[in-house]
Image: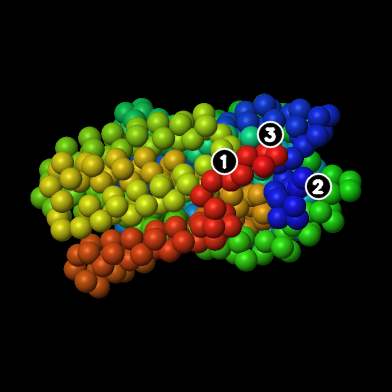
């Protein structure tokens, strides 16, 4: 028997179109999350060519990336108006065309100010589709698996970009990278028909139930949003300075790069594990273990870690990060409809944008990484507490029928 606090968004009777089309949604999420997140993933590869072409300083380069990231997140705001009102095939097609056009035009722009405006529009379009991806995941038969696909597709594309783009585009104009991204984005249009028959509008007869559940779990939902914000604040702050932390400890650049590559591979493996496990009664326990593992890894970074300790910390950090994220998103998605995940996207973007800024400020103010690392541990422990509240204080859910 279902209680008022039971999750409404993953229960679908046989014959429900969303129940039958889960496989299509998984594929759609995988393709679009991999390609659209290139707006954010190419930053390490594209910074140098941008500086060479536009003769900009590091502050202007940072401004460009911050503007893109901010627009990617702020796409959440207009999505409150159209997400459940416009047919998905229409909204996704329009946003994909705009994103592809933005990538294409970026390659032709010679003025930095114009480029900044074009990149903001491109990121708004890409971020709008990300809202759709997050909102669709809870509507599948296995939301945990859908969120796992969402994460692992980005990681795989990120690893591919970092491995291939520096080789393929060595000495090339930055336009070549933008045009490659335009082609990849345009190819996504082939997959838009996967959304036929899929809608984010509440099914007839379910509106009152969803509203009742959301009202009864408002506190838990708020705790979930805080957990995601703190999670991204900590991870983006620490990961942004991971290389510098190693260098400050006296570790050579070559071994550090190898360690970070191994850590990235570990992150892909853990995301694949989470994807394979999918929904689980132990979702809350996985969140606690993952957040605790991240906190331990950050503590290992204190005190100028030698290469071995740095390697353990980096691998544990990335493994725990990508394992816990799908389960954290899945728990939040249980407590509301599409607009709940729309709000979640704002927390993700906010944490991602603020983490490096706050981390850099604390590092500059203190002349070291100690304060930033301690604050990050505090954020992760607070996120752990919020995750417990989000899951109703239970580490293991009751089996069906018990």
Secondary structure of residue under mark 2: loop
Q: Which residue is mark 1?
A: 281
Task: Determine the residue located farthest toward the bottom in the rendered image.
Answer: 365
Residue situated in front as seen by the camera: 130 or 286: 286
Of labels 3 and 1, earlier in sequence is 3
Give the image location of residue 335, x and y in percent: 67, 54
**Label 2–label 1 contact, CB within 8 A:** no
Q: Which residue is mark 2?
A: 201
* Residue 377 seen in render: yes
**In the figure, 38 relative to 299: above or below?**
above
Using the numbered discs, state the Cα–Cα distance from disc 3 to disc 1 in whole angstroms. 15 Å
Q: Nearer the viewer, mark 2 or mark 3?
A: 3
Disc number placed over residue 141 in the picture, else none: 3
- Count neighbours of disc 2 (C-alpha within 10 A) and say few if under 14, some if 14 to 19, many if 20 or more: some
Residue situated in front as seen by the camera: 200 or 128: 200
Q: Nearer the viewer, mark 3 or mark 1?
A: 1
Q: Residue at x 52, y 29 (%)?
A: 276
Q: Residue at x 52, y 32 (%)?
A: 277
Residue situated in front as seen by the camera: 59 or 288: 288
**In the figure, 377 relative to 25: above or below?**
below
Secondary structure of residue under mark 1: loop
């Amino acid at each position: 028997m279902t209680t008022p606090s039971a999750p409404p968004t993953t229960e679908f009777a046989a014959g429900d179109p969303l129940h039958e089309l889960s496989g299509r949604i998984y594929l759609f999420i995988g393709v679009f999350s991999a390609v659209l997140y290139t707006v954010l993933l190419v930053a390490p590869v594209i910074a140098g060519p941008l500086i060479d072409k536009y003769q900009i300083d590091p502050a202007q380069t940072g401004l460009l990336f911050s503007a893109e990231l901010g627009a990617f997140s702020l796409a959440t705001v207009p999505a409150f108006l159209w997400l459940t009102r416009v047919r998905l095939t229409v909204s996704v097609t329009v946003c994909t065309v705009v994103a592809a056009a933005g990538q294409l035009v970026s390659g032709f722009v010679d003025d930095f100010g114009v480029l900044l405006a074009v990149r903001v529009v491109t990121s708004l379009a890409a971020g709008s589709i990300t809202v759709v991806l997050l909102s669709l995941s809870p509507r599948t038969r296995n939301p945990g698996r859908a969120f796992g696909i969402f994460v692992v597709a980005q990681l795989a594309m990120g690893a591919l970009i970092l491995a291939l783009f520096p080789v393929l585009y060595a000495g090339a104009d930055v336009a070549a990278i933008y045009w490659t991204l335009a082609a990849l984005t345009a190819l996504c249009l082939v997959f838009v028909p996967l959304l036929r028959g899929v809608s984010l509008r509440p099914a007839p007869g379910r509106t009152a139930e969803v509203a009742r559940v959301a009202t009864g779990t408002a506190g838990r939902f708020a705790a979930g949003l805080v957990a995601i914000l703190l999670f991204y604040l900590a991870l983006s702050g620490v990961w942004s300075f991971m290389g510098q932390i190693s260098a400050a400890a006296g570790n050579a650049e070559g071994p550090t790069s190898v360690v970070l590559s191994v850590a990235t591979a570990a992150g892909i493996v853990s995301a694949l594990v989470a994807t394979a496990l999918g929904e689980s009664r132990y979702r809350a326990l996985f969140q606690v273990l993952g957040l605790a593992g991240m906190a331990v890894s950050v503590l290992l970074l204190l005190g100028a870690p030698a290469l071995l300790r740095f390697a353990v910390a980096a691998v544990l950090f990335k493994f725990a990060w990508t394992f816990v994220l799908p389960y954290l998103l899945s728990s939040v998605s249980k407590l509301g409809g599409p607009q709940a995940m729309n709000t979640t996207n704002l927390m993700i973007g906010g944490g991602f944008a603020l983490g490096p800024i706050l981390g850099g400020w604390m590092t500059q103010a203190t002349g070291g990484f100690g304060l930033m690392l301690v604050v990050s541990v505090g954020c992760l422990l607070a996120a752990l507490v919020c995750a417990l509240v989000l899951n109703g204080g239970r580490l293991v859910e009751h089996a069906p029928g018990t």
